[in-house]
Image: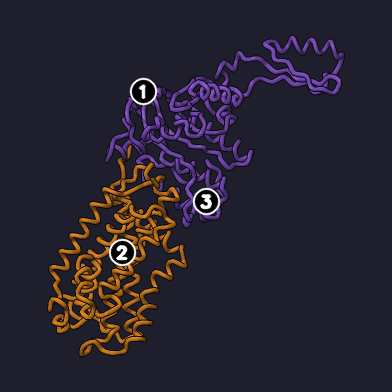
Amino acid sequence: MSVIEVRGLRKSYGQNDAVAGVDLSITQGEIFALLGPNGAGKTTTVEILEGFRTRDGGDVSVLGIDPEIKGLQARTFRDRIGIVLQSTSDAGDLTVRETLTHFSGYYTNGRDPEEVIEAVGLSEKAGELIRSLSGGQRRRLDVGLGIIGSPELLFLDEPTTGFDPEARRAFWALIGSLRDAGTTILLTTHYLDEAEALADRVAVINRGKILEVSTPAELGGRANSLARVQWEFNGVMQEEMTAEPTAVVNRLIEQFSGEIPKLSVSRQTLEDIYLSMVEISEGGAK
Amino acid sequence: MNSLPSTLNLGIRRGNLEIRQFMRQRESVVFTLLFPLILMAIFGSVFKDTIAPGVTFSQYFVAGMIASGLVNSGFQQLAIVIPMERDFGSLKRLRGTPMPVASYFIGKSILVLASMIIQVILLLAGGVLFFGLNMPTSAGKWITFTWLILLGTASSTALGIAFSAVPKSGRGASAVVSPVVIVLQFFSGVFFIFTQLPSWMQQVAAIFPLKWLTQGMRSVFLPDTFAASEVAKSWETGRTFIILLVWLVVGLYFSIRTFKWERA
């Protein structure tokens, strides 16, 4: 079942075509990552889907609703989605528990605040004022607020900016558990390893157009790309790009008769693929 | 499946939350609630004369302070705080939830009303204890007082929300809003006897609600014989009601039309 359907989406600001004909189809229960450089049209696209911005053209359906609706219908729409924006910086004069309890009351199906506090790992901070939280803890509260209404669809905008590696892992586990519970998630992120760890599918967007939609493992022909074998010989690093890394390693085993110095075999990372895709699209457009 | 909570219900919940947040900003609470009393202490010490038989300056001044309180806690406070909430991203976050904007407005009105009630109690108690203030005795005057507070709160809140679209950023909001309020206070007879102001100033003031709130409050706190000393030789109670109502409608119209959730 399709949760988000977008056909030919367009949005311009003056002469600038921020979104120039985007098609997207996101199915229920998947984590879909939208990747792209700053100014690529990510934010505009997502904000149109969230109902924050109007569009100039194209068809948009989110949970079967056109997000441009107003009034009571808009309330019904927002009752079914959760939005985690970039963090707020208010004075934070409420406690974590007060904030989540209050927001829970906005929804028809608001979750138990204690359960959400537990889920985002803020149990020890539940009674503390928000102003006393660290950046990472504030971010977890943001996510808690995003899921407090039991959303069918969750928008996550740069969710782990400012997290330490441990907190990121914990956060990824939380997002995974939401997906397992059936929540559809649209993620925008700058971290390619995050997209790789979380996303079922990724789309790369640049200059207002979708370049490719694929799984992280297959994006940009990654699955069939050449592997890089590196080793040291006479104190100098050697490198070979090959479709058959095993054969290369076998050859090296014979050559060295023992441990091969500084041996490594690697595939292109998602980041390598992504950067070359963006570069090609920039070159093509110039 | 439950149904969505009503706009009024959410508005009341927001009001409670706003009050709680406000009360936790101690410096701001002390300043906002005690400032009128401090001003009254200063003016009461400087002007010791009576204005008319049985009317001390403190008695005259308390009307202006209560009217100013309405403008400060509604218009001024909101026109400064809302742009800040916009900058912080708090408004955008609210926009992403099913809470209707009307609930947000109701919540703000409740905060303004609560802050007004506390200010009035402090000001009147302080006035009676230290400055020989005479409280109104007739039921009619208390009724006028009550609707002035309610209608004043409503229009001041609505105008504050409407004006919140004017400052471009939270940081600059105070510089844009405060001069407007201070000039209005001087023109409207808060700090001086209104009838002693130049007539062009009186005419400018008569366009804006503060003059009418101040005059209305004088009708509550001054003896009825003083009505003859007003510009119109009367309290103009009916006209006050209508003008405040018109400003409420204007404020609501622009609040709805120009309210901005995000920084442009």
Residue A25: image location, x then y, percent? 41, 22
In the rendered view, tell whether residue A279 sits above or below residue A92.
Answer: above
Q: According to the image, label 2 marks what residue?
A: B113
Q: Mark 1: which secondary structure?
A: strand
Q: Is residue A87 left or right of residue B229?
A: right
Report crowding for label 2: few under 14, some 14 to 19, many 20 or more residues within 10 A (C-alpha).
Answer: many
Chain that is orange in the image? B
Visible residue check, residue A284: yes
Res. B31 image quadrant: bottom left
Visible residue check, residue A104: no
* Disc ID at residue A126: 3
Residue B234: image location, x then y, percent? 13, 77
- Could you tell me how far apart the alpha carbons at marks 1 and 3 are, in whole angstroms? 45 Å
Q: Mark 3: which secondary structure?
A: loop
Report crowding for label 1: few under 14, some 14 to 19, many 20 or more residues within 10 A (C-alpha).
Answer: some
**B23 or B233, which is in the foreground?**
B233
Of badges 2 and 3, nearer the viewer stands 2
User: In this structure image, what is the colour of chain A?
Assistant: purple
In the rendered view, tell whether residue A235 sits above or below residue A126.
Answer: above
Q: Amino acid at mark 3?
A: Ala
- Could you tell me how far apart the alpha carbons at marks 2 and 1 are, in whole angstroms? 50 Å
**B204 or A176, which is in the foreground?**
B204
Q: Is residue B195 left or right of residue B121?
A: left
**What chain is tagged by disc 3?**
A
For this orientation, the residue located farthest to the front is A286
Q: According to the image, label 1 marks what residue?
A: A8
* Disc ID at residue A90: none
